Image: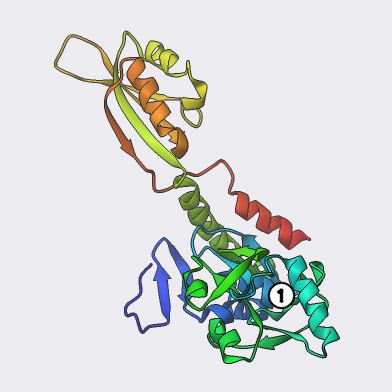
């Protein structure tokens, strides 16, 4: 991506010459896509689910882009030693109601939080919407508990708050959303979206694989490949690639390349060593593309629905 200045709010993607990137505040992106000011948007899943219009124009295309992971959680003062679960919070809200009070919940996500509280049997409460720092709400006295985004929990603990055992409302991360109406009516825009989805999907998939190359002595490429595929689960996405190595010695050597899942890398290394492999090199590919782009197919289905 090319951006001439950090203060400039537009950028270009050289590989996608007809695409313009617009930088917006995170909370505004779902609304911009919904209203049609942008064809696609990268947003937090929490923001999208909170702000989307039921039956509206926006649609979720890629749910997990692999960054921005966090949780929307219910957090209470750590001095509430008898409250550890949502059931306890439901009992507390009822007790407060009997005393003429109401449980006050500060949040920036009123729709998601209200739905979760009702689902967990917390029926007596009032929502306090705030755009500021929610962790200070109980200490300042304008709320009893909070519902907010947390990644590590450190900020909550430093403000003497704790999460409930079953108080996770949503696991969130960056996602890709799109405007159905705009994408469906304009074929060039849809093709540009396909190019973007191919890049995103190929990049995300590549993180889970390593390309491993080893030099193996053998009489023929078929013989070497046969040894490799004795462990088919370690023999690559479709099988090994075997090419002749032109060395100065009399022996015949072949370079064997397999693409293996990240969690099976060391199994693959050991297997290649056992069949005579040496001079092993390992690279992580930038992209791994399949025969079809799954996220683009999902987008086409969403446009037809």
In the image, is 291 to the left or to the right of 95?
Answer: left
Q: Which residue is mark 1?
A: 113
Q: Position of residue 14 (x, y in %)?
A: 39, 64
Residue depicted at 54% across the width and 63% down the height: 192
Residue depicted at 62% across the width and 91% down the height: 141
Residue 55 in view in this figure: no
Q: Position of residue 288 (x, y in %)?
A: 47, 44
Along the line of sight, the residue nearer the viewer: 214 or 39: 214
Q: Quadrant of the N terminus?
A: bottom left
Q: Is residue 163 above or below residue 270?
A: below
Along the line of sight, the residue nearer the viewer: 46 or 203: 46
Q: Is residue 88 above or below residue 247?
A: below
Q: Residue furthest left?
A: 248
Count up the numbered dots.
Answer: 1
Along the line of sight, the residue nearer the viewer: 304 or 234: 234
Q: Position of residue 80 (x, y in %)?
A: 64, 74
Residue 195 in view in this figure: yes
Q: Quadrant of residue 142?
A: bottom right
Q: Position of residue 275 (x, y in %)?
A: 35, 15
Which class describes the residues within 10 Å of circle 1: few (<14), some (14-19), or many (20+)? many
Q: Is residue 252 above or below residue 269?
A: above
Q: Quadrant of the C terminus?
A: bottom right
In the image, is 257 to the left or to the right of 49?
Answer: left
Q: Quadrant of residue 64?
A: bottom right
Q: How is the image coloured?
A: rainbow
Q: Secondary structure at mark 1?
A: helix
Residue depicted at 36% across the width and 84% down the height: 7
């Amino acid at each position: 991506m090319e951006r001439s200045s950090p203060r400039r709010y537009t950028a270009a993607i050289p590989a996608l010459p007809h695409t313009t990137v617009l930088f917006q505040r995170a909370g505004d992106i779902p609304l911009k896509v919904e209203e049609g000011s942008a064809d696609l948007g990268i947003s937090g899943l929490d923001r999208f689910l909170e702000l989307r219009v039921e039956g509206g124009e926006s649609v979720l295309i890629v749910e997990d882009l692999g960054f921005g992971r966090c949780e929307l959680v219910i957090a209470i003062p750590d001095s509430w030693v008898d409250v550890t679960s949502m059931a306890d919070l439901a009992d507390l809200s009822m007790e407060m109601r009997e005393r003429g009070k109401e449980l006050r919940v500060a949040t920036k996500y009123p729709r998601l939080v209200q739905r979760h509280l009702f689902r967990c049997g917390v029926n007596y409460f009032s929502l306090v919407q705030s755009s500021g720092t929610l962790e200070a709400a109980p200490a300042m006295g304008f709320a009893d508990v909070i519902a907010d985004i947390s990644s590590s929990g450190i900020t909550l603990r430093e403000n003497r708050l704790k999460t409930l055992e079953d108080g996770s409302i949503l696991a969130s991360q960056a996602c890709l959303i799109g405007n159905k109406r705009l994408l469906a009516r304009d074929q060039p825009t849809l093709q540009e979206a396909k190019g973007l989805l191919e890049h995103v999907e190929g990049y995300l998939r590549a993180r889970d694989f390593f390309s491993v190359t080893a030099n193996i002595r053998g009489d023929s490429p078929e013989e070497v490949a046969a040894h490799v595929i004795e462990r088919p689960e370690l023999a690559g996405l479709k099988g090994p690639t075997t090419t002749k190595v032109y060395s100065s010695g009399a022996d015949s050597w072949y370079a064997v390349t397999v693409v293996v899942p990240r969690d099976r890398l060391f199994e693959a290394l050991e297997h290649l060593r056992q069949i005579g492999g040496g001079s092993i090199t390992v690279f992580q590919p930038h992209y791994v593309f399949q025969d079809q782009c799954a996220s683009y197919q999902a987008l086409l289905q969403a446009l037809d629905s």
